[in-house]
Amino acid sequence: MHPGSDCAVPTRIRAVASMPCGHCASPPAPAARACEDGRVSSVATPPDTVVLDSVIADLHTGAVRWAALDTAARSALLFAVRDAIAAVATEWADAAARAKGLDPDDPYAAEEWMSGPYAALTMAEAFARSLAALARGGSTLDGARLGTAPGGRVAVRVLPESLQQRVLFHGFAAEVWMRPGETAASVRARAGLGARVPEESGGVGLVLGAGNISSIGPADVLTELVAENRASLLKLNPTFASLRPMYEQAFAPLIELGAMRVVNGDGIVGGYLAEHPGIDKVHITGSGATHDAIVWGTGEEAVRRRASNDPRLKKPITSELGGVSPVIVVPGEWTARDLRFQAEHVVTMRLHNAGHNCIAAQELVLSADWPQRDAFLAEIRRVLDELPARAPWYPGAAARVERTVAEHPGAETHRGRVLVETPADGDDALCRTEVFAPVLGWTELPGAGAEFLERAIGFANDRLFGTLGANVVIAPRDRRAMGPRFRELLVGLRYGTIGVNAWTAVGFLFPQATWGGFPGHTLAEVGSGIGVVHNAHLLADPERTVVTGPFRAFPASIAGGEWSLFPKPPWFLTARSGLATGRRLTEYGKRPSWGRLLPTLWSAFKA
């Protein structure tokens, strides 16, 4: 998902001297600007300020036009966007694959369909439906089920929301947990955000797009338009410069209105735009270093401004900045098939997109008292060795892999992928730094059952950097044994998305779910970022999204006591029909129907 971009992807700094910089390098000189390409360069091409100024002026005109549209007209426009995305889906997915050095027919290209045009078109449709509900005089939560979560929280069920969705994602569920103090009545009353007052323009915003997942930037623009009534300038990360023509075709209805523009450019261009007086707000998906360079400056300037609490950026900024995502494995009695399936699951969490995801699994937390710990690690090694090799494609990633191996004498290398044991006290770079490369750390803590889960949650909260997403793997029998205690413990896991037997990136794909760091970050301590995106039900002040999935694939799921008919997930790197299913899923997403759903399911069951 990530979950990458000018943030989720390592975004860097452009300085005066040419030198390599890693994903987490500190910004060089005070005059530096945010640079998304993972390097620093002495060759700084001045931005064409005349063109950029003109683009921003056009967007201010477009913002007025957008504010003049009622919710019915906006809904119709976003349905047109969905159709435009559908029309260019193949070109979009193929271009994204080539941008990463993949042949469009390579099995790994399945990722580009599911996380690219499919995610974008379902996002456009979800926002269109929420606007349509408001246009009818209803609520964005019409038809939604509201329940409860521990601590008196309201839980909004966002998956499944239809019979077809129940069939397509059978065994999966997702809820948005609201903050303590909200009631069902207040959640319904506050839903809608800026779409409830469409005439109140949010001006013009800058979206600094991600460079790893091609739907991130477009989805962020849709969030700004609908939730904040804000026209948007999408500045692409250089890795996706070749996708600009596809984006402009896919979002032609908004571009023709003047509510959206797309530009290419490096970090110099991003810096110029962020500070432009015509930009009212900035949203960045990327690294904390880039965020801080924009907000505070670099070098001595940053030190001075932080000390006096005087940010350089004098306008609002929201962000999604990644982090170190844990996978907490609750010990239990697993079959050999369970060990293999969950090993494939964990490796997918790490190696999807060659490891270049802000939500990639980075720290595996195991029980030292689990008799099957070594067997599970052996299965993980086996999967790492069996998967087709794929070199890191994101700039700077290869150097970060080499540095990790050099810093950890016991590091194992498996076809270019690295497995590293880290200390239980969390005193390791892999716990403090998002590596954004095919590196998986693992550690062990004592205990079993609820005692282990509670200890592992404390480790994740206190020892790992970031709050974007956390994963929990637990067998149905062991979850049932904990009873209500299981959900009560989840409340203590301070992450914006929690996946239980489901990778948190699945939450990224569902537009009604929320996406962002856990609430509480500030400009001074930005962590995984401030604010949320997606959130197609337009919920006010959500706390987190919780996604659950089946522990086993069908038919083992039924034999193990789970009512789930879901096969091996098509996003698994080991799914044999992943590419075909990604294409079928996108075809289904264009215009959902039973006629398009059945071929999708048929393909998925060939995994």
Image: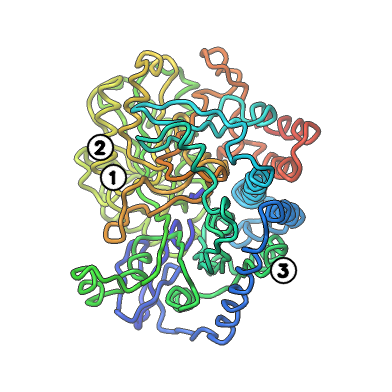
Q: Amino acid at mark 3?
A: Glu
For the residues carrying marks 3 and 2, which lies nearer the camera in this image? 3
For the residues carrying marks 3 and 1, which lies nearer the camera in this image? 3
Q: Please name whichever residue, 53 or 29, is drawn nearer the observer in this view of the structure.
A: 53
Of the two numbered discs 3 and 1 on the same chain, state the one appearing first in sequence.
3
Q: Label 3 vs label 2: CA separation? A: 50 Å
Q: Amino acid at mark 2?
A: Phe
Q: Label 3 vs label 1: CA separation? A: 45 Å
- Residue to which mark 1 is pinned: 464
Instruction: Please say whether residue 277 is visible from this viewpoint.
Output: yes
**Residue 186 in the figure: left or right of residue 29:** right
Q: Residues within 10 Å of mark 1 (few under 14, many from 20)?
A: many
Query: Residue 335's image quarter?
Result: top left
Of the two numbered discs 3 and 2 on the same chain, state the one appearing first in sequence.
3
Disc number placed over residue 337 in the picture, else none: none
- Residue to which mark 3 is pinned: 256
Helix, strand or loop status at disc 2: helix
Q: Position of residue 553 (x, y in %)?
A: 56, 24
Q: Amino acid at mark 1?
A: Leu
Helix, strand or loop status at disc 3: helix
Instruction: Please say whether residue 106 is visible from this viewpoint.
Output: no
Q: Position of residue 430 (x, y in %)?
A: 30, 49
